[in-house]
Image (spheres, rainbow, N blue to C red):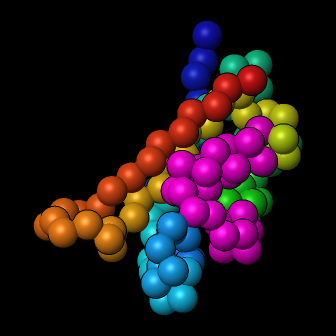
Amino acid sequence: MQSAKIELKELVFFARHGLLEEEAVLGQRFRVDVVVTLNPSLDLSLDSPESTVNYVELYATVKEIFTQQRFNMIEAAADRIAARVLERFAKIISITVTVKKPSVPVDCICDYFAAEVTRCR
């Protein structure tokens, strides 16, 4: 049995997600990772766009949700992306979305806080 994945790594989007009023007003950059697992019955040896998922369309779906909606919680953003991708792309059997928030409103030194959601059919 084959296993095939498509990964979109370190996508950067400016958005206004977060609970605090300052986050809604100022906004910030977020980083998003998306990993999808394709249906193992796909014949990738055909080397044809019909035998896989168009990653440009996948990216457009992620960008649309993340930048055109506002979320209080990055968990909700990750979950909405995962749900919409599974609705839109029948050839995907699972998806993991990680939303990284580098500018956290916490008195700490860190790279980022993150939330990760995995959904399967």
What residue do we see at 74% from left, 23% from top?
121
Residue 15 placement, left or right of 103:
right
Q: How many marks?
A: 0
Q: Is residue 44 magenta?
A: no
Can residue 8 be seen in the rendering of this structure?
A: no
Question: Over which residues does the magenta segment extend?
Answer: 63-86
Magenta highlight on residue 67: yes
Image coordinates of residue 38 in percent, x first then y, are: 68, 31
Residue situated in front as seen by the camera: 78 or 12: 78
Residue 1 horizontal side relative to residue 105, left or right: right
Looking at the image, is 109 positioned above or below residue 6?
below
Asked which quadrant contains residue 1, the reply is: top right
Would residue 26 be seen by someone viewing this image from the given angle?
yes
Residue 79 position by quadrant: top right
Q: Magenta: predominant secondary structure element?
A: helix
Residue furthest out toward the bottom: 26
